[in-house]
């Protein structure tokens, strides 16, 4: 890859990653906002979703420490 194209490629890649994250947030937040006061959300989504996120974070942490 030519030297001048590296910066453009890196910036374009990072903008693509950020756009993907924004798309996920925009897709998830409206339903989460609407469901936030329901029993299903408080007893199902919050504890189980938080536990799944924490477990995934632990797995990634261990992979980075050992790898």
Image (spheres, rainbow, N blue to C red):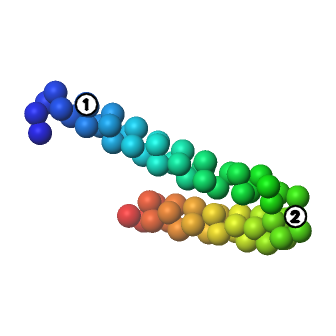
Residue at x-position 60% and y-position 49%: 25
- The local secondary structure at tag 2 comes to loop
Numbered mark located on residue 36 in the image: none
| Nearer mark to the viewer, of 1 and 2 | 2
Mark 2 = which residue? Answer: 38
Q: Is residue 24 visible?
A: yes
Instruction: Classify mark 1: residues with Cα within 10 Å, few (<14), some (14-19) or many (20+).
Output: few
Q: Position of residue 19 (x, y in %)?
A: 46, 43
Q: Distance between the Cα atoms at labels 1 and 2?
A: 47 Å
Q: Quadrant of residue 35?
A: bottom right
Residue at x-position 33% and y-position 42%: 13
Q: Position of residue 50 (x, y in %)?
A: 71, 64
Instruction: Classify mark 2: residues with Cα within 10 Å, few (<14), some (14-19) or many (20+).
Output: few
Q: Is residue 47 visible?
A: no
Mark 1 = which residue? Answer: 7
- Say which quadrant the N terminus sits in: top left
Residue at x-position 73% and y-position 71%: 48
State whether residue 30 is above or below residue 59: above
- The local secondary structure at tag 1 comes to helix
> Relative to 7, is 52 on the left or the right?
right
State whether residue 65 is above or below residue 48: above
Residue at x-position 79% and y-position 55%: 34
């Amino acid at each position: 890859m030519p030297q001048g194209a590296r910066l453009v490629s890196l910036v374009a890649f990072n903008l693509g990653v950020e756009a993907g994250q924004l798309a996920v947030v925009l897709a998830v937040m409206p339903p989460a906002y609407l469901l936030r006061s329901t029993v299903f959300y408080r007893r199902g989504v919050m504890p189980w979703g938080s536990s799944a996120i924490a477990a995934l974070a632990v797995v990634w942490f261990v992979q980075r420490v050992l790898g």
